[in-house]
Image (tube, rainbow, N blue to C red):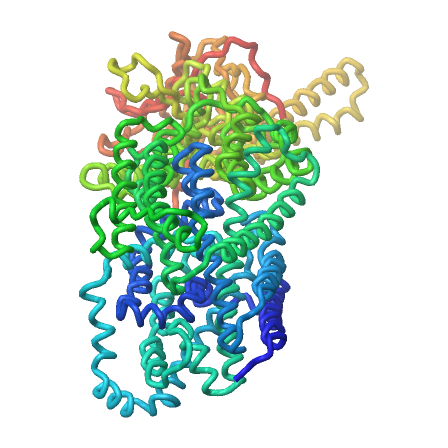
């Protein structure tokens, strides 16, 4: 059956257009996110591994190597079975450091420009035969359908069309942070098409050609050599060699690396792909033996590589077109993704470093320049593949050509093992090993290919030199190339020392970096970042990249904290790595955003760095280290959940701990305080904490502060801590810990209790007040009535003076009550000198207003002139409460004495009564709130508690004891005042 060439080309272009429509619909949001981001879609996109070799060549490979053809897929299954220890760490590195290719990965670990250059050039050379294989498969499949040799322009037209679609699929975004979701879905769609096509051919082979399972069994019994042909190569062929090659190709081929790691949208999808992708490969390989046997049974007039198409031709023209689409799909997907990955490698490691060294990076429209550079490279790479296809005269099967590329990518295995598991590996070891492997690969595989194509004269047989002509060709090339590679890699690494950059990268690869980076940034602001970067990448690119980095970290454009600027620098380097590659980004950042290596990193940032590394380390701590880490986490949690505010400062005033309670008290979140210098906190906390640090007091009680227009009361406590490793305790101060206790609610409650206690006292005095005011009022009324009838001017004058005297008496009583019952808080600025004798006289006057006071004798034996610092109103309440308490404990006719003296900076005041005293067992409890010895309903138990609280607020002390002669004695110690006393005022 002949098929028109134009129809085949139109079908191919139409199918590519359909793939582009799928990608476009995805990026426009026409497809639901649940479908686009589904893990199975990601797993299907990895089906780009199955190229035209898999679609066409697997049948021919099975004909040559029997069941060895399964090794190409079992090796992949093994790689994905090791995903937690092999693929997941690579994915983390790619995502964290925005690496875009295999060359980026090795250049990140083995820090040298030649590393990226060597990997890129070798990958380009190693994959060109694979690209040429796809062109060969498409042109020969056309020949199978048309039954005539295809024109040379067909291959050229296919390459040109594919270049256009490759640009449309993957060269529209310049940064890998914008994942090509459309590309992922389109490749997944392509994988589904080729799977369906191959399964349908298998079904046709079983039922249409062989006549069903029963007939197949009969044919196999009649042709036992068909089964033997599949089993024989397994015992004789290079089973393990093919497994190793497929294992490496599963994730090191450029297209596989790109789809597995670079285009990964959710790391969790890798866990699903670990089982679903091998399942996809299993389904893809199920029909291969059936198609092989059906082709042999039907004696299809094509090479075994194209039995898939030959059987389809037997079934009908429409069926053949659908199978052809499956082949085009397999070839085009491989070429598109491979050229995208290779273009990024060439741009990052060949073009950009050369232009940077020549100071030729464009400072205007850098993004556009990079975009067009990538597009041009895509066209050039496909063109190189076409040239390779035209120059080489391929006499090998599709699988044989593909294995050349497999052996090439296997050369990266030793370096990859060093990257993941051997921190001692060095760049010179990697370069030496890779160079040795490349040499053997070229001599064993490429040179014979060139000789067969007539491009190289002579007969160079490496196997003959090694006297290994009987050894399998692929086993020989793989073993000796990897052996020399590994030996040189290990020897070179042991003979050289890793650079500091390599050591840092090795620790990052294993998440073992416990030592924080050294030095502090020379730049001091975000604006300075932009100015420095603009000198290399231009102002527009610099502003956009800094803005993106700020958004990634959630920072503001006015950020000045050194620790946050350090994080911004690291984020910029990672973002630029995705744009230009890790080496060039490091060069730009190191040159423009310099770090002074002679300065010390902030302690808070060092502590945060170490803790982050412990949290994310891949190394599982064991034994004592694990117990210590558990204890650290526990102590850290306790510290942050402590209801007291905790602030820890270095000797230089840098805040290293600021727990959640401290954030609530101060209103400053921990993330804004930690790492800051104390002076940057702002008022009032800068002044409060600095003053407390500079003072001699270890404790400050009931400190009144104003926060956002509200008064708050706090206690402050501090303790100096020794530096870790100090030999002599107290010799080295490692900083200071300050505890902040918020007493606002307690103080409010105490104030309410004290006020209620005053109101209760006033209630008890009410009857006496009425009597005391009533007597003067009666006298005033009598004198006023007599004034009308008194003719003598001198008598009128005397009566007027007596009226004024009685008025003053009433006023004094009222003012005393007003002072005593005042409800407002007395600010700390109103604290002043209070004359104790005058305060006690006023308290006695108030108490004597009650009826019960008349049965007692009051003596104020305090010497005049003793003044203490305090609040007149609060101290008045203290003495009223103590005198009331003494009256209630005394009998009629008993004396209540108040005496005292000034000694050693304190006033000591004694309040004594002649009552029954206090039982010894209750002396320690009398100041407890709500404790009382009175019967129920006759006391609240708050009077002495209020006394204790007020005296504590004044920095004094109060205690009680029994007198030898009977009665109780309350002793007050209050600090003396050096300022003039405050007069009591209403």
Q: Quadrant of residue 472?
A: bottom left
In this view, the residue in front, 463 or 479, is 463
The x, y position of residue 630, in whole percent, is: 26, 41
Q: Is residue 929 visible?
A: no
Q: Is residue 743 visible?
A: yes
| Image quadrant in which the C terminus is located | top right
In this view, the residue in front, 411 or 923, is 411
Q: Quadrant of residue 205?
A: bottom left
The x, y position of residue 654, in whole percent, is: 46, 23
Which residue of the protein is positioned furthest toward the front in this rendering? 458
Q: Is residue 935 left or right of residue 862?
A: left
Using the image, determine if residue 488 lies above or below residue 78: above
**Residue depicted at x 28% and y 59%:** 242
The x, y position of residue 700, in whole percent, is: 43, 23
How many marks the image carries: the answer is: 0
**Residue depicted at x 78% and y 21%:** 790
**Residue depicted at x 80% and y 15%:** 793
Using the image, determine if residue 832 lies above or below residue 740: above
In this view, the residue in front, 358 or 311, is 311
The x, y position of residue 130, in whole percent, is: 44, 57
């Amino acid at each position: 059956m002949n098929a028109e060439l134009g129809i085949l080309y139109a079908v191919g272009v139409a199918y590519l257009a359909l793939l582009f429509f799928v990608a476009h619909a995805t990026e426009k949001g026409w497809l639901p996110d649940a479908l686009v981001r589904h893990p199975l879609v990601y797993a299907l996109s990895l089906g780009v591994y199955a190229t035209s070799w898999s679609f066409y060549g697997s049948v021919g490979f099975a004909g040559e190597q029997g069941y060895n053809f399964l090794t190409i897929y079992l090796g992949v299954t093994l790689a994905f079975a090791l995903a937690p220890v092999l693929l997941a760490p690579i994915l983390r590195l790619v995502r964290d450091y925005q690496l875009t290719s295999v060359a980026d990965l090795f250049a990140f670990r083995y820090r040298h420009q030649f590393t990226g250059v060597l990997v890129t050039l070798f990958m380009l050379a190693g994959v060109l035969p694979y690209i040429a294989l796809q062109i060969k498969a498409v042109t020969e499949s056309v020949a199978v359908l048309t039954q005539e040799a295809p024109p040379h322009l067909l291959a050229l037209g296919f390459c040109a069309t594919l270049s256009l679609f490759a640009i449309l699929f993957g060269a529209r975004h310049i940064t890998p942070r914008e994942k090509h979701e459309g590309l992922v879905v389109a490749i997944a769609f392509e994988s589904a098409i080729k799977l369906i096509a191959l399964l349908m051919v298998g079904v046709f082979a079983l039922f249409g050609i062989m006549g069903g399972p029963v007939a197949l069994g009969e044919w196999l019994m009649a042709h036992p050599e068909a089964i033997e042909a599949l089993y024989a190569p397994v015992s004789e062929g290079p089973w393990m060699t093919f497994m190793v090659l497929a294992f490496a190709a599963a994730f090191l081929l450029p297209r596989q690396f790109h789809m597995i790691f670079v285009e990964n949208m959710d790391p969790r999808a890798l866990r699903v792909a670990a089982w679903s992708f091998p399942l996809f490969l299993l389904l893809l390989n199920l029909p291969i033996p059936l198609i092989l046997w059906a082709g042999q049974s039907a004696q299809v007039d094509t090479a075994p590589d194209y039995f898939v198409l030959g059987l389809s031709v037997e079934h009908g023209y429409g069926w053949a077109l659908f199978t052809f689409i499956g082949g085009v799909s397999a070839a085009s997907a491989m070429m598109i993704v491979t050229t995208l990955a290779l273009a990024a490698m060439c741009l990052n490691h060949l073009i950009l470093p050369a232009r940077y060294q020549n100071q030729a990076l464009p400072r205007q429209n850098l993004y556009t320049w990079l975009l067009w550079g990538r597009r041009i490279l895509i066209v050039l790479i496909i063109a190189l593949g076409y040239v390779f296809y035209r120059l080489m005269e391929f006499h090998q099967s599709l699988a044989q050509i593909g294995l050349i590329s497999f052996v090439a990518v296997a050369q990266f295995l030793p370096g990859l093992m060093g990257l993941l598991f051997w921190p001692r590996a060095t760049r010179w070891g990697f370069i030496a090993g890779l160079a040795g492997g490349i040499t053997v690969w070229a001599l064993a595989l490429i040179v014979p290919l060139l000789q067969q194509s007539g491009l190289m004269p002579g007969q160079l047989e490496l196997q003959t030199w090694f006297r290994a002509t009987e050894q399998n060709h692929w086993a020989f090339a793989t073993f000796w190339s990897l052996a020399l590679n590994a030996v040189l890699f290990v020897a070179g690494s042991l003979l050289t020392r890793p650079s500091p950059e390599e050591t840092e990268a090795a620790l990052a690869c294993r998440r073992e970096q416990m030592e924080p980076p050294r030095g502090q940034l020379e730049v001091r602001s975000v604006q300075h970042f932009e100015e420095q970067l603009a000198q290399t990448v231009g102002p527009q690119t610099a502003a956009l990249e800094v803005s993106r980095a700020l958004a990634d970290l959630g920072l503001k454009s006015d950020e000045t904290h050194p620790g946050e600027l350090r994080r911004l620098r690291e984020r910029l380097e990672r973002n630029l790595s995705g744009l230009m590659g890790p080496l060039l980004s490091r060069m730009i950042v190191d040159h423009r955003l310099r770090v002074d290596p002679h300065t010390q990193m902030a302690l808070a940032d060092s502590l945060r760095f170490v803790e982050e590394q412990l949290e994310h380390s891949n190394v599982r701590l064991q034994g004592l280290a694990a117990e210590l880490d558990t204890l650290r986490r526990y102590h850290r949690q306790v510290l942050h959940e402590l209801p007291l505010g905790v602030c820890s400062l270095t000797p230089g005033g840098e805040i290293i701990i600021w727990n959640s309670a401290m954030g609530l008290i101060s209103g400053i979140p921990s993330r804004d305080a930690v790492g800051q210098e104390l002076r940057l906190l702002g008022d009032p906390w800068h002044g409060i904490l600095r003053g407390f640090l500079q003072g001699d007091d270890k404790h400050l009680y009931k400190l009144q502060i104003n926060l956002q227009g509200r008064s708050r009361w706090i206690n402050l406590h501090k303790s100096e801590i020794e530096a870790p490793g100090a030999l002599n305790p107290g010799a080295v101060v490692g900083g200071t810990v300050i505890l902040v206790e918020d007493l606002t609610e307690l103080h409010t409650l105490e104030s309410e209790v004290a006020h209620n206690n005053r109101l209760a006292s006033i209630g008890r005095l009410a009857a006496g007040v009425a009597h005391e005011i009533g007597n003067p009022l009666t006298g005033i009324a009598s004198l006023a009535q007599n004034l009308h009838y008194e003719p003598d001017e001198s008598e009128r004058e005397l009566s007027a003076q007596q009226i004024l005297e009685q008025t003053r008496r009433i006023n004094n009583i009222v003012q005393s009550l007003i002072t005593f019952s005042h409800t407002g808080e007395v600010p700390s600025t109103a604290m002043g000198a209070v004359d104790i004798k005058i305060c006690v006289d006023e308290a006695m006057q108030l108490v004597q207003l009650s009826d019960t006071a008349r049965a007692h004798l009051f003596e104020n034996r305090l010497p005049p002139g003793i003044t203490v610092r305090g609040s007149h109103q609060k101290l008045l309440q203290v003495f009223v409460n103590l005198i009331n308490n003494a009256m209630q404990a005394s009998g009629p006719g008993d004396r209540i004495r108040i005496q005292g003296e000034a000694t050693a900076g304190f006033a000591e005041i004694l309040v004594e009564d002649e009552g029954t005293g206090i039982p010894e067992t209750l002396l320690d409890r009398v100041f407890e709130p709500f404790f009382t010895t009175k019967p129920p309903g006759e006391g609240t138990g708050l009077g002495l508690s209020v006394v204790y609280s007020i005296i504590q607020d004044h920095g004094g002390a109060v205690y009680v004891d029994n007198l030898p002669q009977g009665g109780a004695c309350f002793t007050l110690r209050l600090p003396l005042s050096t300022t003039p006393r405050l007069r009591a005022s209403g």
